[in-house]
Image: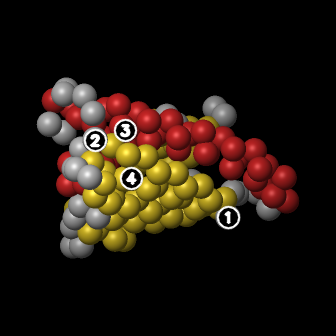
Amino acid sequence: MVGVSESIRIERPPEAVFAYLDQPENHAVVTPSLAESETVEQLDNGGKRARYVYEMAGISREGYLTETTHEDGQRMVFELSGGIAGEIDIRFADADGGTEVTYSAEYELPGGVLAAVAEPIARRFNRRQLEKTLRTLQARLETDSPESGE
């Protein structure tokens, strides 16, 4: 398993940041390698099931994100299935009127021995992708544009 985790402070209340990320389509807006993300089903727990297309090194992987935990304004956990197997855990904490967003991801690299060799490279790549995702999320939500959830 490869795991990465990063945090960032966003000058918006937790409910606003949560509401933005509660729309799977917005994940494709802020995540560099996520080419598509679309809601396919509303779940009984308040979460969603979404289809995704992730592109890395010219290879597309398709699958589904199923929101297994949906705690309004506090936490969302997604199980990844299909082209990438793993879990994404996003937590939202009040930070003096803003939000501390902690985004953690764990996933399996396909390929056995080759995956073990590629793991350090994948970890660095994904850490950079996660940092860029959080900076883009911050910039998007700290503007006054209608797309930012205002």
Badges 3 and 4: C-beta atoms under 8 Å apart? yes
- Mark 2 vs mark 3: give the one in front: 2
Report the residue marked by disc 3.
Answer: 137
Badges 2 and 3: C-beta atoms under 8 Å apart? no
| Res 37 seen here | no
- Mark 3 vs mark 1: give the one in front: 3
Vertical relation: 142 (above or below) 40: above
- Dot 3 amino acid type: Leu
Badge 3: how crowded within 10 Å, few (<14), some, or many (20+)?
many
Going from N to C along the chain, the mark reached first, 3 or 1, is 1
102 relative position to 148: left or right: right
What's the residue at 29%, 64% (across, down)? 74
Secondary structure at numbered mark 1: loop
Task: Between residue 9 and residue 89, name the one nearer to us.
Answer: 9
Going from N to C along the chain, the mark reached first, 3 or 4, is 4
Going from N to C along the chain, the mark reached first, 2 or 4, is 2
